[in-house]
Amino acid sequence: MKKKGKFFLMGIVAIIFIVLNSFGSIVRFVTDYLWFKEVGYTETFFTKIKAQFMIGVPIFILLSILLFIFIRKLRKTYMAASD
C-alpha cells in the first residue's frame, strides 16, 4: 500500500473513532437542548454552556501551558542525565 493510502486510511479510522466516541455526548447535548426548549428555558441552557466555556477554556489554556513547561524541563533534565 502506498504511503498516501496508509495516511488516508489512518485519517478515516481516526475520524470514525472520534465520531463514535463523541456520539454519546452529542446525543446528550441535543437531548438537553430539546428539553430546555420544550419547557421554555433555552436562555438558561445557553447560559450554562457559556459559563462552562468561560471556566473551561482558560483552565485548559493554563494547564496546557503548564504541561508544556513541565515537559520542556523534563526533557532538559533527561538529556542532561543521559550525557
Image (tube, helix red, strand yellow):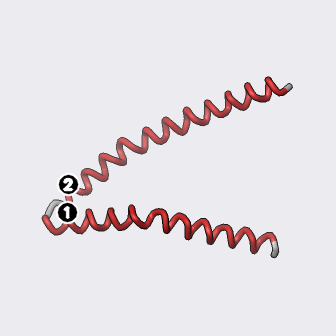
Compared with 83, 68 (above or below) is below
Q: Residue 23 is drawn in which quadrant?
A: bottom left
Outermost right residue: 83
Mark 1, Cα crowd under 10 Å, few <14 / some 14-19 / many 20+, is some
Q: Nearer the viewer, residue 48 or 15?
A: 15
Q: Mark 1 = which residue? A: 36
Q: On the rendered structure, is 47 left or right of 20?
A: left
Which quadrant is the C terminus positioned in? Answer: top right
Q: Residue at x 36, y 48 (%)?
A: 53
Which quadrant is the N terminus positioned in? Answer: bottom right
Q: Residue at x 83, y 27 (%)?
A: 82
Name the spot of residue 26 as percent of width and height, x first: 38, 65
Q: Are marks 1 and 2 in contact (CB under 8 Å)?
A: yes
Q: Residue at x 80, y 24 (%)?
A: 80
Q: Nearer the viewer, mark 1 or mark 2?
A: 1
Mark 2, Cα crowd under 10 Å, few <14 / some 14-19 / many 20+, is few
